Image (tube, rainbow, N blue to C red):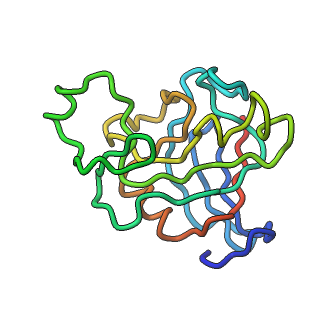
Amino acid sequence: MKNNGVGDMQDYLDICIASQQLTVYADGMPVQRYPVSTAKNGAGQLMGSECTPTGWHKIRAKIGAGQPLNSVFIGRRATGEIYNADLVMQYPQRDWILTRILWLGGLEPGKNRYGKVDSTWRYIYIHGCPDHLMNGRPESHGCIRMKNADVLDLFNNIDVGIKVYIYE
């Protein structure tokens, strides 16, 4: 999967909102599947909608290399905290972004790129979350949530530029 080349459509990530599943394709074949949690508000493109955007994207940035499992991120920066019960009690309303961030950039002008539908400027990520929140249901604020060990595995096995297809 590594060094796949941005233009290689044989290697991509397939995210199905209906099945809450991310499938990794290499050489056109499914090689790995992970459970995900997409937006509680369903699919949608508009900024502020808290919906998961659909269509073709790419991984525009990988954030968090070298950070420990369950590292906490705010504004794409590691805080130095490690997710635990004490932090949950201290910050009960926090939308936890943990372990790694794969920042998405839309590839379809007018659908998920530019203006009020731009996935990059909506800060749409694939990221880790508290593992107990991964229950097979869409519950995010627009991002694609994953278990921490899963997002770490994915992060370590893909390159920036790999295409991502999100659909209902």
46 vs 56, nearest the viewer: 46
Point out the image quarter for the N terminus.
Answer: bottom right
- Where on the picture, by quarter, is residue 129? top left
Residue 128 spot, x, y in % from top left? 41, 47
Point out the image quarter for the C terminus.
Answer: top right
123 vs 50, nearest the viewer: 123
Furthest residue in direction right, as rendered:
109
**Residue depicted at x 54% and y 41%:** 144
Residue 108 spot, x, y in % from top left? 84, 44
Furthest residue in direction bottom, as rendered:
3
Residue 4 spot, x, y in % from top left? 69, 75
State how many labels appear: 0
Q: Is 111 left or right of 71, judged from the image as shown?
A: right
- Where on the picture, by quarter, is residue 130? top left
**Residue depicted at x 57% and y 50%:** 103
Residue 120 spot, x, y in % from top left? 65, 43
**Residue depicted at x 62% and y 21%:** 48
**Residue depicted at x 63% and y 26%:** 51
Q: Is 1 left or right of 165, judged from the image as shown?
A: left
